[in-house]
Image (cartoon, rainbow, N blue to C red):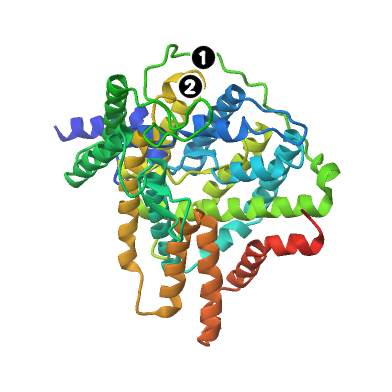
Amino acid sequence: MATREVGSRKAANGSAAGWLDRYFSISDRGSTIEREVRGGLATFFTMAYIVVLNPLIIGTVPDVDGALLGVPQVAAATALVAGVLTILMGVVGRYPFAIATGLGLNAFVAFTLGSQMSWADAMGLVVIEGIVITILVLTGFRTAVFHAIPAQLKTAISVGIGLFIAFIGFVDAGFARRTGVGPVPVELGVGGQLYGWPIVVFVLGLIVTALLVARHVKGAILLGIVGTTILAIVVEALVEAGPAFDAGGNPVPTGWALNVPSLPDSIVETPDLGLLGNFSLFGSIEHVGVVAALLFVFTLMLADFFDTMGTVVGVGAEAELLDEDGNLPGVDRVLLVDSVAAIAGGAASTSSNTTYIESAAGVGEGARTGLASIVTGVLFLLAIFFTPLVAIIPYEAATPALVIVGFLMFQQVRSIDLGDYGIAIPSFLTIVVMPFTYSITNGIGAGFVSYVVIKLAQGRAREVHPLLWGVAALFLVYFGIGPIEDLLGVS
């Protein structure tokens, strides 16, 4: 009997499942293939909106010559790059991180770069930024900076990202909105009231997802997204709430955000991949000059550099994958793939691609390895052909998951020593600046600069890692980029 059991184990270890387990360390990280698949699905459904949203940002804004990239073309390229690079992250990085076009970075490319140069020239700057980041990884500098950050400040980054993505969820769902007048920047719904069926769907989705998570139901977040999407389709069929903007571009507070949840006429489309390779490395210099081009690359690089670092720390901490110093084992592999993703995004005219904080949704479902990323990546590749199906998910159905994941990440705040002001104040600034300024990079910068300044004022400068002095100085340049451009005569 004992011999038979040993033989069975050997057979299992030699099987495909056994090979996957060994390569991705699935059992060692306390996961299962089922959890990895479920986590990969949850991550995809939480961030699939980028296939629709990125084309609306990149594909509809004219460049300096009035040319448009086009919504269908950007949608296909966005899904392709996200799929290939997320699979690469799974195979090489071996962690449950998904990659897609970076929000914020794409807006910078569209509204700042595109207004001053051609799209090919703007994407060339993105490629250059990605090359620089890749060199920093290969030389070990990016990893060294990652290790130089104090563990509690890394925790603060994770907590701040949790609040940030929860805030994104509330804003994208219309639960919180700009007031437009007065000193209060945001308010509940419209005029302090919740109006419209889409908000009802969001609230019900949030309640149901919270209950599922509280009862430790397997697949809670994924079930929440799918169930809320089905509810949204039914509600729209009954009440016809329509989109959040009318034909004239005027806001409709009671309409659906991003997508109207109705079954599409066609499920499959033939993708147009004509944007691949449409970039010019040095064409931007002819439009804005060397100094301005370098400043643009610096801005892109700094945002990309620390957005990814914050995401890796936040998601890694939520998955309990960090070591006792708050570092992710093998992080250099993750950072290398992320850097290559920036190059790929520029080369495909989708803007810089980066590691997504929505990966936390998959972690919330139990994902701990790169197998989940492979599942997410394959779904993105399928989305190239099924963009009409991806486009049925409204913000109101996807954002309850972001709010719940934000709560899960926020719980780490208890490990910060609030009695030590040398770390507590920088941690606080890191946490609050992220959602208040809608930027992970700004929060990290505020934390780093205040950490260095406070330690210096306390006479504890020796506790600051030498690299952090340089990083803090770079962030001072980042925060003062406007005055610096004015001083140099760069618009």
Do tag 2 and tag 1 residues touch (Cβ < 8 Å)?
yes
Q: Which mark is residue 269?
A: 1
Q: Residue at x 41, y 57 (%)?
A: 158
Residue 81 image offset from top left, x and y in percent? 57, 31
Residue closer to the observer: 148 or 479: 479
Residue 335 image offset from top left, x and y in percent? 55, 49
Quick one: label 2 or label 1, which is nearer the N terminus? 1
Q: Residue at x 59, y 50 (%)?
A: 304
Q: How many marks?
A: 2
Task: State the residue lying farthest toward the top.
Answer: 265
Residue closer to the observer: 50 or 241: 241
Rendered position, 411 above or below 390 = below
Q: Secondary structure at mark 1?
A: loop
Q: Residue at x 48, y 44 (%)?
A: 356
Q: Secondary structure at mark 2?
A: helix
Residue closer to the observer: 152 or 390: 390
